[in-house]
Image: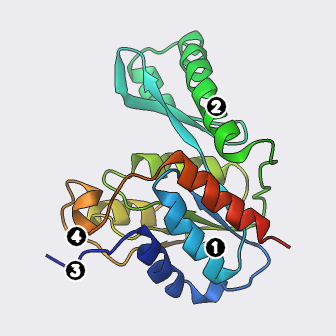
Amino acid sequence: MQNLIHNRTIAGQNLAEALPSYLSQENVIVLALPRGGVPVAFEIAEKLHAPLDLLLIRKLGTPGYSELAMGAIASGGIRVLNKRIMSSYGVRQAEVDAVEIKERLELDRRSELYRGQRPYPKLGHKIVILVDDGLATGATMHAAIDAVKQLNPQKIIVAIPVAPLDSIKSLQQMVDEVICPLQPRQLSSIGQWYADFSQVSDSTVIDLLNQAWSNEH
């Protein structure tokens, strides 16, 4: 087994070193997938002198098959739907709307908790670096990428400390660049690749965001 990642902070510092071409570029923004992605993304944003923000994602579960995503919603009023799954399972628009209302409440609750009234960043023509603390299936990151694409970024980079080879190959078809130092053939859980994978609390997320935002010029 390859060496373990010490913790999310070190993981973020290592990823930042793999992104030198984006240092101090005005049109770069780092978006974290909370909660685990925030400590990683914080280090990247600090090292690159780039703004940090969140991309909150909620899966829209198919009625009767809640684990199967028929789409997703994201920060800033974004909605992505999988028409193929909706058609295959005969999902009506009214059912989609009902699921979305429920998930939007939770997304808005988290947004208010983490971001308060801070306006969402404009991603048009930006170089967007999407960050999480690792990927297993990659389903959430896929939804995040689809959401960001709707906002016409110049470029999308995915930066993650660890992900299985299959997930990396899938992501490479969707974005401009994938940075991932650890690429095991199989990954049953992200935590097995970390020496310290303790849960990230809401208060930690809020503290890191406030720290990043207070440093903005």
Give the crowd class for mark 3: few <14, some 14-19, many >=20 residues within 10 Å: few
Residue 199 percent location from the top left of the image: 38, 52
Residue pointed to by mark 4? 184
- What crowding class fits label 1: few (fewer than 14 Cα within 10 Å), some (14-19), or many (20 or more)? many
Above or below residue 45? Residue 130 is: above
Query: What kind of residue is marked 3?
Result: Asn
- Give the CA separation, mark 2 to mark 3: 38 Å
Residue at the disc numbered 2: 109
Instruction: Tell us which disc is closer to us: 4 or 2.
Output: 2
Q: Amino acid at mark 4?
A: Pro
Report which residue position mark 1 lands on: 45
Could you tell which of marks 1 and 3 lies nearer the N-terminus? Answer: 3
Q: Residue at the location (64% across, 31% down)?
A: 109
The answer to whether residue 179 is seen in the rendering is no
**Mark pair 1, 4: CA separation:** 26 Å
- Residue 190: percent from left, percent from top: 29, 58
**107, 88: nearer the viewer:** 107
Q: Residue at x 71, y 46 (%)?
A: 115
Q: CA distance from mark 1 to mark 2?
A: 25 Å
Residue identifier under label 3: 3
Toward the left, the furthest residue is 1
Which quadrant: the N terminus?
A: bottom left
Q: Residue at x 68, y 48 (%)?
A: 150
Dot 2 amino acid type: Arg
What amino acid is labelled 1 in the image? Ala
